[in-house]
Image (cartoon, grey):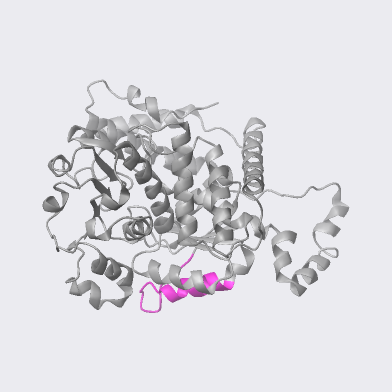
């Protein structure tokens, strides 16, 4: 089987490459390989029957006239749609593609690669089916209209068990999520914000254990005040963090009570809430904020020089540095370590400590679906973070290994069960079971999905890309960096 081993990839680069050149080459390699393999497969997701065809007469059962009974049953009781169709295990991945990774507005179809990727991860990691839906949210004047997304989701929600919002630009993402969470009958989850916050909190919980800190005593600097980092700040506060010890920076400076520009724009109400709660001394200089800080959480402009070594060097002893911009972190982890960081994490899987929402949303949405929850509460996201942190701690944590990886299959069922149990506590579960029952169902679905994917590969229904694609991508990256 063709294996992509990122841990040994740097051995394929010229021996005289510096650490920075290797990091750049890895990024270029992955981008080129993605382009080549997506062209090879024509995308990542296909539709496969769930029911068998035991002869053509069965189409009278799966379609007309037999299926009429299914339609009328659902008509009389809409809740049966979760049992008589795939709705109970189906997520709509919805985006207007206005904030795709670090690439900005990519036009509606430009988000398909990411949304299909989301669906791919949901299926393999969480045993959840998902459909990518990239929509046009522009009004007649060419402005992105949050009401267009809200209206679309409300109208199509009856086909899904949950909705995953993705890559919607700020500030529209706030209104879209907050409105749909209250007005839809199924969970609506914004993964860029809530998912990233959940996994970041999980990593922070274990980083604090390793550095012998309490969350309420920890001084945290946030670089970037978009949907992800503002939600991370909110969930850390809800987990016990002291907002008075937090300072957030956006492109215009720090957030504080005198930021009249944020107060004046009612669309940025989430940022204004943090202006009122954090940075009581109105520190407006980044270096001053970093001096003595225990932790940096950066989700801002891709690096590698957005955060500089000298800014890491003035932090407290055993500092914690999360630089999670995509596709290139604000500072590479090796550079952060050289500057004195004790724990360094990024959003990438080719470095230690990947703090990435891919560790969260497959299990979180699986748990919400199993409980048939009406929403994903903030408590459910916090429960997922605690589950991730506990799972990692049980198998052992180190400064280079603070959080589970996607390769640890058991983590997603463990997380799903924790989320489902919290849904019961929060009064949003429509199906109540024990922790073990939720876990067993999640694990069964995940293993079924993985076995099916392996079967398709082993029997040639999914073909392996040729080795030449990896070689071409590698040569491309090396030649670009030289």
The residue stretch that appears in magenta: 135-155
Left or right: residue 153 versus residue 23 is right
Farthest residue, direction right: 57
Quarter of the image containing the C terminus? top left
Does residue 247 show up? Answer: no
Residue plotted at (67% across, 32% down): 459
Residue 396 sits above or below residue 255 on the image = above
Left or right: residue 350 versus residue 307 is right
Residue 202 sits above or below residue 475 on the image = below
Question: Within the magenta stretch, is there residue 108?
Answer: no
Q: Position of residue 150 (x, y in %)?
A: 48, 73
The mark total stands at 0
Closer to the camera, 391 or 215?
Answer: 215
Residue plotted at (23% across, 26% down): 17
Question: Within the magenta stretch, is there residue 142?
Answer: yes
Q: Position of residue 172 (x, y in %)?
A: 37, 70
Left or right: residue 102 versus residue 252 is right
Quarter of the image containing the N terminus? top right
Does residue 102 show up? Answer: yes
Q: Position of residue 145 (x, y in %)?
A: 40, 74
Q: Position of residue 228 (x, y in %)?
A: 35, 57
Left or right: residue 273 versus residue 106 is left
């Amino acid at each position: 089987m063709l294996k992509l081993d990122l841990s040994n990839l740097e051995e394929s680069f010229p021996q005289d490459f510096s650490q920075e050149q290797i990091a750049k080459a890895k990024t270029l390699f992955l981008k080129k390989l993605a382009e080549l393999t997506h062209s090879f497969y024509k995308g990542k997701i296909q539709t496969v029957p769930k029911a068998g065809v035991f002869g053509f007469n069965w189409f009278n059962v799966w379609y007309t006239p037999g299926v009429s009974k299914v339609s009328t049953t659902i008509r009389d009781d809409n809740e049966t749609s979760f049992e008589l169709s795939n709705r109970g295990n189906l997520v709509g991945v919805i985006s207007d593609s206005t904030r795709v990774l670090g690439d900005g507005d990519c036009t509606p179809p430009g988000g398909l690669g990411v949304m299909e990727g989301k669906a791919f991860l949901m299926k393999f990691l969480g045993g959840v089916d998902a459909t990518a839906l990239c929509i046009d949210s522009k009004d007649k004047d060419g402005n992105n209209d949050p009401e267009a997304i809200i209206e679309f989701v409300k109208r199509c929600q009856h086909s899904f068990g949950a909705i995953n919002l993705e890559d919607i630009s700020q500030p529209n993402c706030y209104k879209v999520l907050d409105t749909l969470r209250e007005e839809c009958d199924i969970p609506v989850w914004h993964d860029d914000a809530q998912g990233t916050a959940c996994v970041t909190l999980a990593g922070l919980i274990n980083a604090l254990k390793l550095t012998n800190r309490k969350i309420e005593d920890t001084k945290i600097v946030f670089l970037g005040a978009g949907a992800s980092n503002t939600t991370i700040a909110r969930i850390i506060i809800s987990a016990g963090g002291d907002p008075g010890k937090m300072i957030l920076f956006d492109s215009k400076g720090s957030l504080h009570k005198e930021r009249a520009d944020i107060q004046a724009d009612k669309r940025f109400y989430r940022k204004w809430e943090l202006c009122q709660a954090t940075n009581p001394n109105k520190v407006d200089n980044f270096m001053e904020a970093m001096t003595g800080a225990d932790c940096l959480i950066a989700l801002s402009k891709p690096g590698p020089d957005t955060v500089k070594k000298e800014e890491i060097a003035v932090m407290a002893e055993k500092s914690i540095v999360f630089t999670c911009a995509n596709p290139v972190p604000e500072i590479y982890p090796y550079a952060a370590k050289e500057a004195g960081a004790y724990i360094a994490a990024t959003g990438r899987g080719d470095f230690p400590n990947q703090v990435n929402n891919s560790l969260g949303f497959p299990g979180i949405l699986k748990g919400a679906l199993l409980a048939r929850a009406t929403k994903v509460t903030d408590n459910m996201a916090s429960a997922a973070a605690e589950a991730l942190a506990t799972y990692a701690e049980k198998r052992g944590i180190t400064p280079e290994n603070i959080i589970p990886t996607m390769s640890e299959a058991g983590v997603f069922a463990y997380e799903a069960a924790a989320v489902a149990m919290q849904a019961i506590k929060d009064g949003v579960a429509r199906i109540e079971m024990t922790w073990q029952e939720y876990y067993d169902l999640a694990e069964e679905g995940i293993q079924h999905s993985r076995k099916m994917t392996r079967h398709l590969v082993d029997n040639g229904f999914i073909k392996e890309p040729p080795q030449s694609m990896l070689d071409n991508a590698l040569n491309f990256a090396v030649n670009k960096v030289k």
